[in-house]
Amino acid sequence: MLQNIRVVLVNTSHPGNIGGAARAMKNMGLSRLVLVDPEDFPSGEAVARASGAVDILEAAQVVATLEEALVGCSVVLGTSARDRRIPWPLLDPRECATTCLEHVGLGGEVALVFGREYAGLTNEELQRCQFHVHIPSDPEFSSLNLATAVQVLTYEVRMAWLAAQGQPTKMSKLETTAMLNTQLVTADELELFYGHLESTLVEIGFLDPQKPRHLMSRLRRLYGRSAISRLEMNILRGILTETQKVVRGEPHKRRQDDV
Ligand code: SAH
């Protein structure tokens, strides 16, 4: 699916940007790069900036005109750092990604077209695109680096593609770790903790049972906000137990060594 979305770079001056764009594409699972009349390509600088995405550079198609780059595309989206005079259907990067996936989902091919570092795309080139895409940057400083603009759009394409595949956008290993640490305590375990906390506070003289002054309800409110995990509850209970041993003059741990 993603192989049917091509990135077209028009008349790029800096080979480093071509390498950066290739890297951004490979990170996001895109593979098809088309270069329209690049000023300096192939180049060692492009390879250096591509990092491990040299395969994308090697497979890049170099053509002389934008028309050649767009052959076979059912939709062409042209990116622009600023508003142009002629009103045109304008999409943000997220809408652009949805449009790309709609077309490739129907078996079509899509082109994302990026302009020159110094001058962007000409009005004539922009008029070859059905849609214009603008990354909503600060109007006072709206122009992104070329490879960075490629990164933003390909990232949105990947997010939309993952959603369409029903694939998670988080790493499963992280999720599992988070789950283990956030197995929440049950209401009855929490009650046992409050009982333990209250008796400890009485023992250390912090809570006067004759004048409790809402202390326990305030502490309940505090801990209640915390979504305490099993692991955290064990730590809290451990602290209370050790505190009681100290007040009672019983042998106790000196260091926090095995909570
Ligand atoms: N001075 C040029 C800036 C070109 S930046 C101009 O005013 O058009 C090089 C390319 O990066 C642009 O042609 C476009 O493809 C992309 N780009 C940079 N900033 C962008 C933005 N805010 N939205 C969409 N594309 C952007």
Image (cartoon, grey):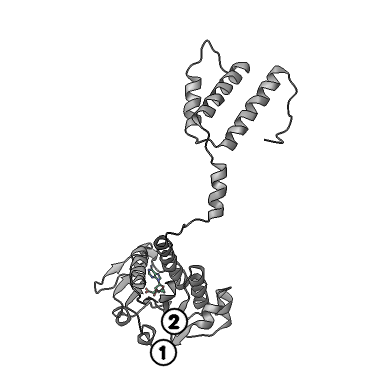
Residue 194 appears in view: yes
Instruction: Please state if 203 lies on the left or on the right of 1 as rendered.
Output: right
Instruction: Please state if 157 lies on the left or on the right of 186 as rendered.
Output: left
CB atoms at circles 1 and 2 under 8 Å apart? no
Q: Earlier in the sequence, mark 1 or mark 2?
A: 2
Determine whether the residue tagged by mark 2 lies in a helix, strand or loop: strand
Q: CA distance from mark 1 to mark 2?
A: 10 Å
- Rendering quadrant holding ligand 1: bottom left
Image vertical order of residue 207 relative to residue 109, above or below: above
Asked if the beta carbon under badge 1 is closer than 8 A to the nearest atom of ligand 1, the reply is: no
Assess disc 1: are there few (<14), some (14-19) or many (≥20) residues with their C-alpha within 10 Å of its C-alpha: few
Quadrant location of the C terminus in the rendered image:
top right
**Residue type for callout 2:** Val
Image vertical order of residue 163 relative to residue 89, above or below: above
Q: Which residue is mark 1?
A: 64
Q: Write the residue at 51% across / 73% down.
A: 20
Q: Write the residue at 51% across / 15% down.
A: 212
Select label 1 or label 2 by which is in front.
2
Q: Which residue is mark 2?
A: 34
Given residues 147 and 210, the one toward you in this image is 210
- Residue 250 in the image: x percent, y percent? 73, 20
**Residue type for callout 1:** Ala
